Image (cartoon, helix red, strand yellow):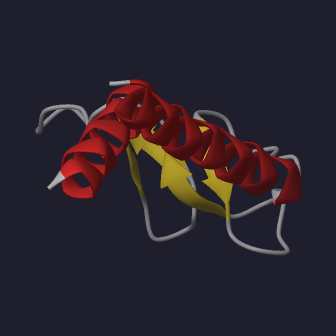
Amino acid sequence: MASTLNKFLLVLVALVVLATHAAAQSPPCSIKQCSECVAGSTTQCAICNPGYRLNAKGQCVTNVNAAAAPHVAVTAVAAVVTAVVAYTL
């Protein structure tokens, strides 16, 4: 039991370190409703916040015709659960 718990905690810590490192590498983004700018640019968005979509100019605009994308936290939880299940199998 303790071995499984240790493996889970190790995977969780690794994911947190990777997420922290990725967040630290991103330049500050000056686009409204943008969660991640294009690499090396602070004026062109790559990924918009939930409820927004990317237009041709690299800006985030309201996405009124579709459901919002899953929140980053939901995606992170899904990744952790998938990693734990894959590791234990």
- Give left or right: position of 21 versus 63: right
**Of residues 23 and 17, the one drawn nearer to the viewer in this rendering:** 17
Residue at 27% across / 37% down in the picture? 81
- Give left or right: position of 82 versus 12: left
Q: How far across and down, in percent of the image, does residue 85 sit?
A: 19, 46
Q: Quadrant of residue 4?
A: top left
Q: How far across and down, in percent of the image, does residue 54 sit?
A: 43, 56
Position of the C terminus by quadrant: bottom left
**Of residues 37 and 21, the one drawn nearer to the viewer in this rendering:** 21
Vertically, is 12 above or below 19?
above
Q: Is residue 28 visible?
A: yes
Residue at 48% across / 36% down in the picture? 49
- Give left or right: position of 32 versus 46: right
Position of the N terminus by quadrant: top left
Q: Is residue 50 visible?
A: no
**Of residues 82 and 38, the one drawn nearer to the viewer in this rendering:** 82
Q: Quadrant of residue 22?
A: bottom right
Vertically, is 16 above or below 56?
above
- Give left or right: position of 83 versus 16: left
**Of residues 57 and 51, the one drawn nearer to the viewer in this rendering:** 51
Q: How far across and down, in percent of the image, does residue 20 sit?
A: 76, 43
Question: How many numbered discs, if any?
Answer: 0
Residue at 42% across / 36% down in the picture? 3
Residue at 27% across / 34% down in the picture? 70
Vertically, is 39 above or below 64?
below
